[in-house]
Amino acid sequence: MDKQLDFAKAEARLKRRHTVRNMLVYGMLTLWGVLVLFPFYWMILTSLKEYGAYNAESVPSFIVTNPTVQNFIDAFSKVPLADYFVNTLIFTLATTAIMLVVIIPAAYAFARIDFKGKNLVFTLFLALMMIPNELVIITNYVTVTNLDMRNTFMGLILPSVMSVFYVYLLKENFSQVPEELYLAAKVDGTSDFKYMWKVMLPICKPTVITITILKVIECWNSYVWPRLITDEEAYYLVSNGIQAIRESGFGRENIPAMMAAVVVISAPLVLLFLVFRKKIMAGVARGGTKG
């Protein structure tokens, strides 16, 4: 009887410790979530405030009593925000499509095709990740300038169509597909291209989707290279356009309209992540799991 009582007390203590630990963990996660999401809340809040009401606030208000959409109208009517959107869409879609055409065969070759010096080539290929981005940007800038491709979409797109990390991620994913499938396909006379297209890509679809989404986000948020290679407003992307708006009189004076432009630009990426978040997590986890 005493042993049962002691066991029950010990179990109760463990449950209390477990409950307290969970409360602390979830409390810290909640606090962290609030800190991370607060800038987005403040951005949306400011975008809905009237210009006069915002300037009249001596103490910032955390609620909007009279929300307005005029700031969003001003963001599109007083600055060429729609043109920035079109430029960014062209840049993002073209860069992502060309990148997939480049990295998928490269990853497949490293994963399945045996050729002399493959391991050495792949090691040297991975070593490129050690080169600082600043050095790459300088080299790309000189090359694009010498080819007279500044202020062109080709100059924006070409330096961004290759990613060593994405090749590595996809190669690791391809390597997890049983080699017996490849040998059976070769016995049936299937070409490497057909095997890659019909077998490997459908099996590794989550990782390909993940890479595509991450590249879209990367292109949409691209700032340094477009800012460096374009100085004509006709080729501005949304990131550079927002900077131009901020530096103009419109952006400095009308903060709510500025925030409205930022909300509009951020919304596609937020929606993209919310829709495909499970595929992103699954693809990254699959690509990083061996065996």
Image (cartoon, rainbow, N blue to C red):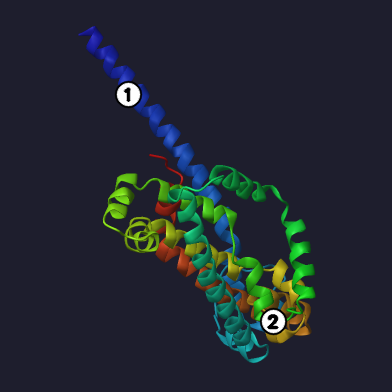
* On-image quarter of the N terminus: top left
Q: Is residue 183 above or below residue 12?
A: below
Q: Are there few (<14), some (14-19), or many (20+) residues within 10 Å of tag 2?
A: some
Residue shown at 72%/56% (left/top)?
Answer: 133
Residue 191 placement (x, y as % from top left) = 36, 61
Q: Is residue 7 above or below residue 165?
A: above
* 204 vs 249, nearest the viewer: 204
Name which residue lies at 52% across and 43% down. Answer: 28
Residue at the image position 65 percent from the left and 46 percent from the top:
127
Q: Is residue 85 at least partly visible in the picture? A: yes
The residue at the point 78 percent across, 63 percent down is 138
Question: Circle 1 sits in a helix, a strand or a loop, which is it?
Answer: helix
Q: Earlier in the sequence, mark 2 or mark 1?
A: 1
Q: Describe residue 22's horizontal placement relative to residue 81 as left or right.
A: left
- Residue 158 is drawn in which quadrant? bottom right
Left or right for 131, reference 37: right
Label 2, secondary structure: give it. loop
Q: How many marks?
A: 2
Q: Picture coordinates of residue 186 (x, y %)?
A: 32, 54
Q: Please name the residue that numbered disc 2 is placed on.
A: 152
Which residue type carries mark 1? Ala
Q: CA distance from mark 2 to mark 1?
A: 69 Å
- Relative height, residue 72 to residue 21 (above, below): below
- Work out whether residue 178 can be spotted: no
Quadrant of res 197: bottom left
Q: Amino acid at mark 2?
A: Thr
Q: Position of residue 249 (x, y in %)?
A: 78, 84
Which residue, given by chain and number where applicable, does mark 1 sit on? 12
On the image, the x and y values in percent for residue 270 come to 50, 67
Q: Furthest-left residue in view?
A: 1
Q: Which of the two discs, 2 and 1, sits closer to the camera?
A: 2
Rendered image: mark on residue 177: none
